[in-house]
Image: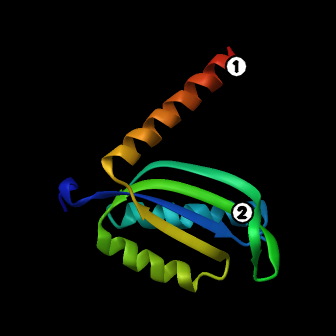
Amino acid sequence: MSTDALRDYEMMIIFTPVLAEDDYKTAQKKYADYITEKGGKIVHQNAWGLRSLSYPIEKKTTGLYWVVEYQATPEMNGDMETQMNRDEAIMRHMITKLDKYAVEYNAKRRNKTATVEETATA
Protein backbone atom coordinates (compact mmCIF):
# COMPACT_ATOMS: atom_id res chain seq x y z
CA MET A 1 0.00 0.00 0.00
CA SER A 2 1.45 3.39 -0.92
CA THR A 3 1.44 6.21 1.61
CA ASP A 4 -0.37 8.35 -1.00
CA ALA A 5 -3.52 6.31 -0.28
CA LEU A 6 -3.40 7.29 3.41
CA ARG A 7 -5.67 10.12 4.47
CA ASP A 8 -5.69 12.12 7.70
CA TYR A 9 -8.39 11.44 10.29
CA GLU A 10 -9.25 12.31 13.85
CA MET A 11 -11.30 9.93 15.97
CA MET A 12 -12.95 10.62 19.29
CA ILE A 13 -14.27 7.75 21.36
CA ILE A 14 -16.31 8.04 24.55
CA PHE A 15 -15.90 4.91 26.62
CA THR A 16 -18.29 3.97 29.40
CA PRO A 17 -17.19 5.51 32.73
CA VAL A 18 -17.42 2.18 34.57
CA LEU A 19 -14.16 0.96 33.00
CA ALA A 20 -11.24 0.49 35.36
CA GLU A 21 -8.06 2.42 34.50
CA ASP A 22 -6.40 -0.73 33.10
CA ASP A 23 -9.45 -1.54 30.96
CA TYR A 24 -9.50 2.05 29.65
CA LYS A 25 -5.84 1.80 28.61
CA THR A 26 -6.40 -1.66 27.11
CA ALA A 27 -9.33 -0.36 25.05
CA GLN A 28 -7.20 2.54 23.76
CA LYS A 29 -4.39 0.16 22.85
CA LYS A 30 -6.84 -2.14 21.07
CA TYR A 31 -7.89 0.56 18.60
CA ALA A 32 -4.39 2.07 18.26
CA ASP A 33 -3.07 -1.42 17.42
CA TYR A 34 -5.96 -1.97 15.00
CA ILE A 35 -4.97 1.18 13.08
CA THR A 36 -1.29 0.20 12.85
CA GLU A 37 -2.01 -3.46 12.01
CA LYS A 38 -4.16 -2.38 9.06
CA GLY A 39 -1.36 -0.22 7.64
CA GLY A 40 -2.31 3.10 9.24
CA LYS A 41 -0.07 5.41 11.22
CA ILE A 42 -0.83 7.03 14.58
CA VAL A 43 0.09 10.73 14.48
CA HIS A 44 -0.98 11.69 18.01
CA GLN A 45 -3.23 10.37 20.75
CA ASN A 46 -4.60 12.06 23.82
CA ALA A 47 -6.53 10.44 26.66
CA TRP A 48 -8.73 13.18 28.11
CA GLY A 49 -10.01 10.94 30.87
CA LEU A 50 -13.32 11.34 32.67
CA ARG A 51 -15.46 14.25 31.44
CA SER A 52 -19.07 15.30 31.85
CA LEU A 53 -21.40 14.61 28.94
CA SER A 54 -23.62 17.30 27.43
CA TYR A 55 -26.58 14.95 27.79
CA PRO A 56 -27.06 11.53 29.40
CA ILE A 57 -26.12 8.50 27.29
CA GLU A 58 -27.40 5.14 28.49
CA LYS A 59 -28.30 6.86 31.81
CA LYS A 60 -24.67 7.92 32.31
CA THR A 61 -23.64 11.57 32.74
CA THR A 62 -19.87 11.08 32.36
CA GLY A 63 -17.60 9.26 29.94
CA LEU A 64 -13.94 8.45 29.37
CA TYR A 65 -12.76 10.41 26.34
CA TRP A 66 -9.94 9.43 23.98
CA VAL A 67 -8.87 11.38 20.89
CA VAL A 68 -6.49 9.98 18.27
CA GLU A 69 -5.18 11.60 15.10
CA TYR A 70 -4.06 9.08 12.50
CA GLN A 71 -3.49 8.33 8.84
CA ALA A 72 -5.33 5.44 7.20
CA THR A 73 -7.24 4.29 4.15
CA PRO A 74 -10.97 5.03 3.93
CA GLU A 75 -11.73 1.28 3.77
CA MET A 76 -10.04 0.69 7.13
CA ASN A 77 -12.34 3.24 8.77
CA GLY A 78 -15.43 1.28 7.71
CA ASP A 79 -14.06 -1.91 9.24
CA MET A 80 -13.07 -0.09 12.43
CA GLU A 81 -16.54 1.52 12.72
CA THR A 82 -18.05 -1.97 12.64
CA GLN A 83 -15.72 -3.05 15.46
CA MET A 84 -16.60 0.03 17.53
CA ASN A 85 -20.34 -0.46 17.04
CA ARG A 86 -19.98 -3.99 18.46
CA ASP A 87 -17.85 -2.89 21.43
CA GLU A 88 -20.02 -2.55 24.55
CA ALA A 89 -17.38 -0.38 26.26
CA ILE A 90 -17.93 2.40 23.68
CA MET A 91 -20.88 4.74 24.22
CA ARG A 92 -20.17 7.05 21.23
CA HIS A 93 -17.53 7.47 18.55
CA MET A 94 -16.89 9.85 15.70
CA ILE A 95 -14.33 9.81 12.89
CA THR A 96 -13.60 13.08 11.11
CA LYS A 97 -11.59 13.41 7.90
CA LEU A 98 -9.05 16.21 8.31
CA ASP A 99 -8.10 18.58 5.52
CA LYS A 100 -4.57 19.99 5.24
CA TYR A 101 -5.52 23.06 7.29
CA ALA A 102 -6.81 20.95 10.18
CA VAL A 103 -3.64 18.85 10.12
CA GLU A 104 -1.50 22.03 10.24
CA TYR A 105 -3.64 23.47 13.05
CA ASN A 106 -3.36 20.29 15.14
CA ALA A 107 0.42 20.17 14.63
CA LYS A 108 0.81 23.82 15.66
CA ARG A 109 -1.41 23.31 18.70
CA ARG A 110 0.60 20.23 19.77
CA ASN A 111 3.92 22.04 19.33
CA LYS A 112 2.65 25.08 21.24
CA THR A 113 1.42 22.87 24.09
CA ALA A 114 4.74 20.98 24.16
CA THR A 115 6.65 24.29 24.28
CA VAL A 116 4.48 25.59 27.12
CA GLU A 117 4.95 22.34 29.09
CA GLU A 118 8.74 22.38 28.55
CA THR A 119 8.90 25.99 29.74
CA ALA A 120 6.81 25.18 32.82
CA THR A 121 9.07 22.29 33.86
CA ALA A 122 12.33 24.22 33.24
Picture layout, residue 118 above or below residue 77: above
Q: Is residue 40 visible?
A: no
Q: Which residue is mark 2?
A: 64
Query: Could you tell me residue 112's position as x and y percent?
Result: 53, 28
Q: Secondary structure at mark 1?
A: helix
Query: The residue under label 2 is which amino acid type?
Result: Leu
Side of 96 relative to 45 (left or right): left
Which corner quadrant of the image does residue 17 belong to?
A: bottom right
Picture layout, residue 14 above or below residue 8: below
Of the 4 image quadrants, the one containing the C terminus is: top right
Callout 1–callout 2 Cβ contact below 8 Å: no
Label of residue 14 in the image? none
Side of 96 relative to 50 (left or right): left
**Disc 1 residue crowd, few under 14, some 14–19, many 20+, Cα 10 Å:** few
Q: Is residue 117 visible?
A: yes
Picture layout, residue 86 above or below residue 29: below
Q: Marks 1 and 2, how far apart in space? A: 27 Å
Query: Could you tell me residue 11's position as x and y percent?
Result: 50, 62
Which corner quadrant of the image does residue 53 belong to?
A: bottom right
Among all residues in the image, which is located at the extreme bottom?
A: 86
Residue at 35% over, 72% down: 76
Residue at 39% over, 72% down: 77
Q: Earlier in the sequence, mark 1 or mark 2?
A: 2
Query: The residue under label 1 is which amino acid type?
Result: Thr
Of the 4 image quadrants, the one containing the N terminus is: bottom left
Q: Which residue is mark 1?
A: 121
Tell how many labels.
Answer: 2
Query: Could you tell me residue 25's position as x and y percent?
Result: 66, 59
Side of 72 relative to 20 (left or right): left
Q: Secondary structure at mark 2?
A: strand
Residue at 64% over, 26% down: 117
Side of 38 relative to 46 (left or right): left
